[in-house]
Amino acid sequence: MSETPISISSLNDFVFCPVSIYFHSIDADEDDLLIKDEYQLKGTDSHKSSDSATYSTKKSMLQNICVYCEQYNLYGRIDTFDVEKGILTERKKKIKTVFDGYIFQLYAQYFALIEMGYTVKKLRLYSMDDNKIYSVKKPESNTEMYEKFNALLKKIDCFSFETFCQENAEKCNNCIYEPLCSFSIKK
C-alpha cells in the first residue's frame, strides 16, 4: 500500500483516467470558472448543501465530515450519513450510469465509518436532478465489486506515467483536460 494517503474522490477520477488526477492537482487552487466545464460546475454547486452541512438539521445526520480509513490509507469527506438509520449516501448531480468509481467512493467512506465505530447498514447513491436513489450492496455482499475495489487500489499504488497508455477514446472525448493532455488518444 502507498505511504501517501489516497483521496476518496480520486478513486472515481482514476477509474475515469489516471491522468485527470494530475490535472486536478495542478488546478486545485485555480478559479473554478477557468478550469471546470458546465457539468463539473453544476456538480460542485449541487454539493453546496452537504458541503456546508445545511442539507439537514437532524442531529443524527453527519454532513461533509472528514474521514480516514487506515486499512486502505484513504481520506476524504462523506456527503451524508444518517447515524440513526445507518444509511451512507453519496450524492451526485445526475446519475445516468452507476459507474464503478461511484461505488468505490462509497466503499472507501464505508470502511472509514466502520473504523470510526459507526454501524453502516445501507449504502446508496442519490441522483439529485431526478431524485433517484440507487442502492449499492455492501462490499461483503458483493465479492466481485470488492475485488475490483482492491484491484483499483493496487493499480493506483503502482501507477506509472511512463507505462500508461489511454485506450478509450470516449474518455478523452469527455475530458476537459484533453486539449492539454499528451496522453490523449485523439492526438
Image: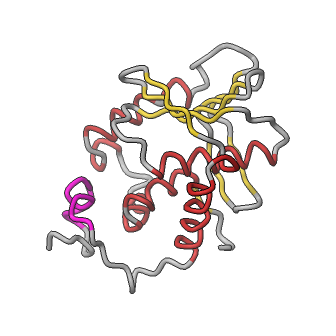
In the rendered image, which quarter contains the C terminus?
bottom left
In the rendered image, which quarter contains the N terminus?
bottom right
Describe residue 38's horizontal placement relative to residue 48 as left or right. Answer: left
Which one is in front, 135 or 156? 135
| Residue sitting at the far bottom | 162
Q: How many marks?
A: 0
Describe residue 48's horizontal placement relative to residue 123 as left or right. Answer: left
Q: Is residue 87 magenta-colored?
A: no
Tell me the colour scheme of the image: secondary structure
Describe residue 36's horizontal placement relative to residue 77 as left or right. Answer: left
The residue under the point 69% across, 44% down is 110
The residue under the point 34% across, 41% down is 40
Residue 149 in which image quadrant? bottom right
**Residue span colored magenta:** 168-180
| Residue sitting at the far left | 187
| Residue sitting at the far right | 117
| Residue sitting at the far top | 57
Which one is in front, 97 or 164? 97
Q: Is residue 46 above or below residue 149?
A: above
The residue under the point 19% across, 63% down is 179
- Prevailing SS of the magenta stretch: helix
The residue under the point 27% across, 59% down is 171
Image coordinates of residue 151 in percent, x first then y, are 57, 68
Image coordinates of residue 125 in percent, x first then y, are 51, 34
Which one is in front, 31 or 5? 5
Describe residue 66's horizontal placement relative to residue 163 as left or right. Answer: right
Residue 97 in which image quadrant? top left
Image coordinates of residue 173 in percent, x first then y, are 19, 57
Image coordinates of residue 77 in percent, x first then y, are 62, 42
Q: Is residue 169 magenta-colored?
A: yes
Q: Is residue 94 above or below residue 129?
A: below
